[in-house]
Image: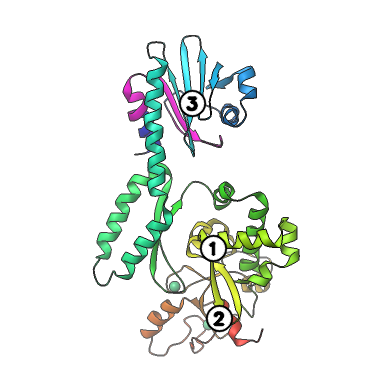
């Protein structure tokens, strides 16, 4: 069910409500509204901030779609207003605000009941599907046993059915491949908000700044012409200059790192005596809008190609996804990269096993990822 369906069927469909809208709790977007009920972002912002601090709306009321309402009552989860004989009732449900207007023929109590039934539904729907980890683990487990018991087409059509339902909540399960194992995994992602606004619900601005610095290091600083590492060690991550500019103490930076791993934004691995953090499959999916600006694309016109190309991410020659773990051509300036599993499959079909771009012998010796550091002593 889409947001528009909620409005038309669950709210206006009752015949007791004249206008309705569903918006984000932060007051930054109107997700759906009944025809002609045009709540502006300024109006919404005032309303949303009324849940945090009701002083302003209690004093001067609030506007919706150009109509001015007197604030009658503000409670923790609800705001009730009036204009003449028309009432308006607004409820926050965690991620959303539901706004309904009702005529004098509808009792306030009835309108409240209708909205609360819907808000309970949204809250429980949110809870049951937001158990991302459980979905991940379950689906990964199904996939690993795929060859034994589950038909992949059945699984994919099952997931596409789930997607038809959760798209109304701005969620989608997307398939990706874990680069380190070559195993397909499905990840529940939020399709409307970007990664940084998602992070802002769980992390403070310093922690988000720290995350951005880690990203910058993993994508840019650890990636040079000679070495494409795409990783940061824990000691690099906790370097004083890095955490100081984000305004974090060492203890809170360590706690943030652990939380980024726990919530699937970063992957943590041991290599020798070092602890490395790399971009997780979830990050690679959800950060794609950021990452794609760093991808090497022969069609891009860079001013100084030779320096820029070598410091950009490359796509796998076989599957065309970004490679942050895999093999590179032995020729240092050749842009050919393969994931390990893609290289095996691709080269198994080639008699000569040569780089498809420059013709150099393909050796599977030159790594992309933290294994790149094996060839040098650090
Ligand atoms: Zn590949
Ligand atoms: Zn090559």
Q: Residue 359's spot in the image, x, y percent?
A: 50, 86
Display colour scheme: rainbow
Q: Is residue 65 above or below residue 352?
A: above
As measured in the structure, the alpha-carbon distance from the residue carrying label 2 to the one carrying label 1 is 20 Å
Q: Which residues are magenta?
A: 9-33
The residue indicated by pointer 2 is 371
Q: Quadrant of residue 271?
A: bottom right
* Outermost residue toward the top in this view: 84
Residue pictured at 76% horizontal, 64% vertical: 241
Mark 2 vs 1: CB contact within 8 A: no
Residue pictured at 57% horizontal, 27% vertical: 47
The residue indicated by pointer 1 is 261
Foreground label between 2 and 1: 1
27 drawn magenta? yes
Tell me the tag on residue 223.
none
Mark yes or no: residue 327 visible: yes
Mark 2 residue element: helix
The residue indicated by pointer 3 is 90
**Of callouts 2 and 1, which one flags the residue occurring earlier in the amino acid sequence?**
1
As measured in the structure, the alpha-carbon distance from the residue carrying label 3 to the one carrying label 1 is 37 Å
Tell me the crowding category of disc 3: few under 14, some 14 to 19, or many 20 or more residues within 10 angstroms, Cα based. Answer: many
As measured in the structure, the alpha-carbon distance from the residue carrying label 2 to the one carrying label 3 is 55 Å
**Of callouts 3 and 1, which one flags the residue occurring earlier in the amino acid sequence?**
3
Tell me the crowding category of disc 2: few under 14, some 14 to 19, or many 20 or more residues within 10 angstroms, Cα based. Answer: some
Q: Nearer the viewer, residue 258 or 267?
A: 258
């Amino acid at each position: 069910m889409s947001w528009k369906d909620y409005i038309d069927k669950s709210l206006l469909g009752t015949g007791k409500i004249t206008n309705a809208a569903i918006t984000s709790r932060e007051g930054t977007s109107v997700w759906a509204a009944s025809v002609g009920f045009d709540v502006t972002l300024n109006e919404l912002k005032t309303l949303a901030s009324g849940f945090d601090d009701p002083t302003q709306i209690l004093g001067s009321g609030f506007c919706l779609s150009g109509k001015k309402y007197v604030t009658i009552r503000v409670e923790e989860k609800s705001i009730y207003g009036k204009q003449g004989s028309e009432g308006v009732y607004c409820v926050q449900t965690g991620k959303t605000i539901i706004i309904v207007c009702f005529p004098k023929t509808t009792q306030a109590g009835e309108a409240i009941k209708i909205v609360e039934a819907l808000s309970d539904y949204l809250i429980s729907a949110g809870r049951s599907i937001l158990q991302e980890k459980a979905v991940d683990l379950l689906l990964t487990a199904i996939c690993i046993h795929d060859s034994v018991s589950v038909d992949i087409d059945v699984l994919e059509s099952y997931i596409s059915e789930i997607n038809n339902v959760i798209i109304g909540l701005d969620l989608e399960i997307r398939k990706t491949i874990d680069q380190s194992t070559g195993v397909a995994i499905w990840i529940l992602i939020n399709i409307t908000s970007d990664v940084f606004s998602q992070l802002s619900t769980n992390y403070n601005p310093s922690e988000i700044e720290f995350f951005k610095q880690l990203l910058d290091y993993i994508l840019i600083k650890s990636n040079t012409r000679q070495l494409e590492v795409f990783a940061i060690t824990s000691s690099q991550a906790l370097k004083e200059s890095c955490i100081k500019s984000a305004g974090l103490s060492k203890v809170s930076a360590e706690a943030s790192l652990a939380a980024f791993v726990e919530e699937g934004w970063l992957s943590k691995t041991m290599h020798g005596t070092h602890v490395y953090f790399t971009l997780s499959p979830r990050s690679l999916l959800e950060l794609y809008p950021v990452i794609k600006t760093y991808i090497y694309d022969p069609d891009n016109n860079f001013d100084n190609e030779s320096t820029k190309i070598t410091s950009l991410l490359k796509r796998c020659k076989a599957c065309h996804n970004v490679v942050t773990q895999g093999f590179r051509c032995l020729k240092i300036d050749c842009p050919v990269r393969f994931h390990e599993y893609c290289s095996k499959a691709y080269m198994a079909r080639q008699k000569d096993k040569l780089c498809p771009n420059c013709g150099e012998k393909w050796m599977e010796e030159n790594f992309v990822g933290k294994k790149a550091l094996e060839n040098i002593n650090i």
